[in-house]
Image (tube, rainbow, N blue to C red):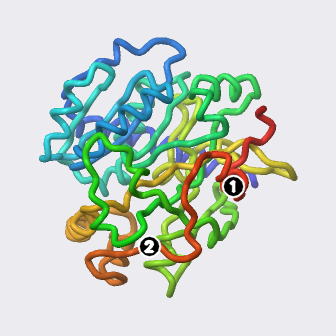
Amino acid sequence: MGVLETYRLRIRRRRWLIRAIRKRRELRKVSNRTHKIRAGNILLFSTLRNEAHRLPYFLEYYRDLGVHHFLFVDNDSNDGGREFLAEQPDVSLWTTKSSYKSSRFGVDWLTWLQLRYAHDHWALTADVDEFLVYPFCDTRNLGALTDWLDASGIRSFGAMLLDMYPKGPVNQAQYKPGQNPFEIASWFDSGNYTITRNPEYNNLWIQGGARSREFFSENPFEAPALNKIPLVRWSRRYTYVSSTHALLPRGLNQVYDQGGGEKASGCLLHAKFLDGFAEKAAEELIRKQHYAGSVEYQAYSDGSDDDPDFWCKWSERYINWRQLEMLGLMSKGNWT
């Protein structure tokens, strides 16, 4: 990368950080318990809207994994989720009625909170339907992973988003609050993925899987990106570019193999496809608050009936992280 390009990206990063500082005015504190955060604590950042039924298991999962404190931005929910989160002793919560789209799809809001609270902490950024699995996660918590990353001089950890789905029509997969969603959505595509390198940010761009197969078969290049960098040893100089797909400085995006071999990586199990999916997709299509004019939700509307069925004879049933490693969807690298 030339000097001019490096300078351009540095200016872009500074501009986005300044933008996030300005966007803090859109956030209203509901419950701020950040005084409980201690040095070495692992923090989780998330935005949400009307996801109350997902929250009990989401919190349970990441508490068990080793997250110490959660920082949420609620985008004008009306389903009781905000009230539920406000009562949780390890949650700090802000709310806003402002545009999700105009905040760079929530990135500006979280960037402000990360700038304010995450400096020198390991910060995990995830939607409430995303569940991180990584090598040895069945026996080693996040603290063990971040200790190893620190000892190895690694500042960021990549994970592929893996769309999970039930066997049979999605809306027949009845989900109860507090339930492990992967008791229902236990299937995934083991292949059907494409990988390219984005030269601007030096990150890998991954597409494919169930959503591409079901909704973007005519134009797979418009399918949602599956590459994510959810776990970062945060600095107040950092910012995400778009969702958690890429970061600046761009050196943080080198989370996969460089010049041979493999780096440790994980998967984010994506529990999007449960009952209520069609109603949620229809609502988001009307709101048009998502990327590229909500093209993903338009594809859902155009490409299916009200009850899609992702399962096919090539679907694989999820067992554990070792299975994902054997399939080449994640790697333990040199972590043993």
Q: Which residue is mark 1?
A: 202
Task: Name the residue located 50 percent from the left edge and 49 percent from the top edge.
Answer: 244
Let me know if residue 246 appears in the view: no
**Is residue 328 something that shows in the picture?**
yes
Judging by the rendered image, the residue that carries numbered circle 2 is: 310
Q: Is residue 22 above or below residue 233?
A: below
Q: Is residue 284 left or right of residue 256?
A: left
Name the kind of residue labelled 2 in the image.
Phe
Foreground tag (2 vs 1): 2
Q: Is residue 2 above or below residue 96?
A: below
Image quadrant in which the C terminus is located: top right
Circle 1 crowding by C-alpha within 10 Å: few under 14, some 14–19, many from 20 = some
Q: Secondary structure at mark 1?
A: loop
For the N terminus, the quadrant is: bottom right
> Image quadrant of residue 335?
top right
Report the disc number at residue 115: none
Question: Along the line of sight, which residue is nearer the eye, 84 or 317?
Answer: 317
Provide residue 195's location: percent of width, then percent of height.
Answer: 67, 66
The residue that appears at 46% across and 51% down in the rendered structure is 243
Left or right: 157 as drawn, with respect to 310: right
Which residue is found at the position 85% from the left and 49% from the top?
261
Kind of residue sitting beneath label 1: Asn
* Mark 2 or 1, nearer chain start: 1
Mark 2 lies on a secondary structure that is loop
